[in-house]
Amino acid sequence: MNLSRFVLLLATACVARAALVRLEVTSRTNVAGYERIVGRAHFAVDPALPVNRAVTDIDRAPRNAAGLVEFSADVLLLRPGKSNGTLLLDIPNRGGARAASAFDEKFLMEQGYTVAEVGWQFDLLDGENLLRLYVPEARGVRGLVRAEILVNARATRHSVAEANHRPYLVLNPDDPALKDALRALGEKVLSKRAR
């Protein structure tokens, strides 16, 4: 499968919500009978389309000159020397490209499968070989963010994020109402877990 056919296929698969506007290739490496392509896919969506209104706060995201909201995602492509015309598309959780290893990369390449891994999480920490989604920041959004945080020992400080994720910023950490709410919540959770 050549690169232009892959771009067309990816654009067709995303047409319901987004349009692929550009594929930026950052590296190409030949590996024993196949090619490893790393890059970034650039998308744009029309926030006025009903299907896109399901995206939280899309109406508050910055728009380009055409009125579209732009975003991008890291992409990893494994292209066999001889394609069988089949694409294995993976949208990996926590940014780890796993499809090729789960199905045995060598086997997939020998059988002619093209593998595409596309990042979808915007809140991953920076790290080697992670596939991320890059989204614009919605303007003027403030509100409650909930996360369950489990610790092994009593602690007075902890990140407001799940493991390996970027935490949301706390606008006013010294707000007495926030401290009271956290203290009350902690007491409630501790009493439930102690039973």
Image: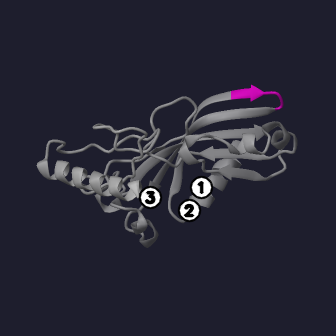
Q: How many marks are shown on the rendered structure?
A: 3
Of the residues shown, which amino acid type is indicated by label 1?
Answer: Ala
- Work out how far the residue at label 3 is from the one at label 2, CA to CA, in angstroms: 9 Å
Outermost residue on the bottom side: it is 50
Residue 159, percent across and down? 35, 39
Magenta span of residues: 29-33
Mark 2 is on which residue type? Val
Tell me the residue that label 1 is attached to: 11
Q: Amino acid at mark 3?
A: Val
Question: Residue at image x 43%, y 65%?
Answer: 52
Which part of the image, by quadrant, shows the C terminus?
A: bottom left
Circle 1 SS class: helix
Q: Which residue is mark 3?
A: 45
Left or right of 90? Residue 173 is left
The residue at which mark 2 appears reads as 15
- For the stretch drawn in magenta, the main secondary structure is strand
Describe the colour scheme in one phrase: one colour
Q: Are marks 2 and 1 in contact (CB under 8 Å)?
A: yes
